[in-house]
Image (cartoon, grey):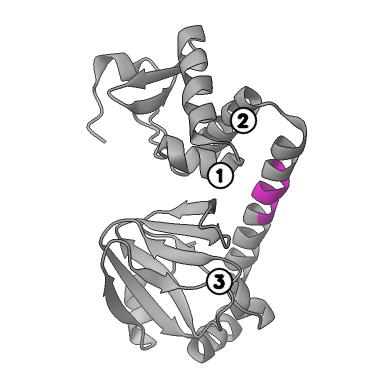
């Protein structure tokens, strides 16, 4: 979901620069702002007491994140960390609520976004409960391609590292590496210079995409 930046600025939104590795907000804390990523990459994740992560999403420029408390009044359900140097635009919660009241079309867009994210969670839960590693990884890559999220439509590159795929599928990174090698050998995916591509997208071979 992306709200027009100029419009947000007229409402009093402000830019914030965040350095790589810096925490933007923490799971369990109160939400005071709407956040939208302008530049960089944000890791939206749950971290247990042992430091193990479960990756909820890798947020790309133009996407919003952490909105759930703005709708139910609860605390943040996950932690947001800058995966690289970022620029974020923030709007205070009271102004965000007023914006939704005055612009029902934006409210409808957020409702659609919430439904899409809930559908993704149902999808992941089904994959984690019933499928073996190869099926989990294959289904995740297929979903990313279908939704064009964390995925380059030009060259077929998956914009997730093996560790991030492991964190999203609840697998050990060693299992992901081993399984992806098998998938590569079968032609289901291409592994090229450490990057993962969909196996049936021929532009990978030509190297025509610089992303």
Q: CA–CA distance between discs 2 and 3? A: 28 Å
List the residue tagged with mark 1.
Answer: 168
Which residue: 39% across, 39% down? 159
Residue 188 seen in this snapshot: no
| CB within 8 Å, label 1 to label 3 | no
Sort mark 1 into few (<14), some (14-19) or many (20+) by Cα contacts within 10 Å.
many
Q: Nearer the viewer, residue 133 or 190?
A: 133
Q: Which of the numbered marks, if any, corresponds to residue 139?
A: 2
Disc 1 from disc 2: Cα separation: 12 Å
Residue shown at 26% from the left, 36% from the top: 211
- Discs 2/3, front: 3
Sequence-first disc among 1 and 3: 3
| Magenta segment boundaries in residue numbering | 118-123
Which residue in the protein does label 3 denote?
Answer: 27
What is the magenta segment's predominant secondary structure? helix
The mark nearer the N terminus, 1 or 2, is 2
| Direction from residue 178 to residue 109 in the image, left or right | right
Considering every residue shown, the one lying at the far front of the view is: 50
Residue contact at pointers 2 and 3, CB within 8 angstroms:
no
Q: Residues within 10 Å of mark 3 (few under 14, many from 20)?
A: some
Is 121 magenta? The answer is yes
Residue at the image position 55 percent from the left and 57 percent from the top = 50
Placement of 183 over or under 83, stated as above or below: above
Relative vertical location of residue 144 with respect to residue 44 in this rendering, above or below = above
Helix, strand, or loop for circle 3? loop
Residue 140 pos. (x, y %): 58, 35
């Amino acid at each position: 979901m992306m709200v027009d930046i100029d419009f947000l600025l007229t409402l009093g939104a402000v830019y914030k620069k965040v350095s790589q590795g810096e925490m933007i907000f923490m799971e369990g804390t109160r939400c005071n702002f709407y956040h939208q990523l302008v530049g960089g990459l944000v890791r939206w994740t749950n971290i247990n007491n042992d430091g193990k992560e479960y990756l909820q999403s890798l947020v790309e420029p133009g996407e919003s994140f952490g909105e759930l408390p703005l709708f139910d009044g609860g605390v943040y359900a996950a932690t947001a960390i800058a995966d690289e140097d970022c620029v974020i635009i923030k709007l205070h919660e009271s102004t965000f609520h007023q914006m939704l009241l005055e612009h029902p079309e934006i409210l409808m867009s957020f409702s659609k976004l919430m439904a899409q994210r809930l559908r993704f969670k149902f999808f992941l839960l089904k994959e984690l409960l019933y499928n073996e590693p190869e099926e989990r990884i294959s289904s995740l890559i297929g979903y990313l391609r279908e939704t064009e999220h964390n995925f380059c439509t030009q060259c077929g590159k998956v914009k997730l590292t093996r560790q991030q795929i492991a964190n999203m599928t609840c697998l050990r990174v060693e299992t992901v590496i081993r399984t992806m090698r098998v998938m590569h050998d079968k032609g289901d995916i291409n592994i090229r210079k450490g990057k993962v591509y969909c196996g049936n997208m021929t532009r990978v071979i030509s190297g025509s995409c610089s992303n």
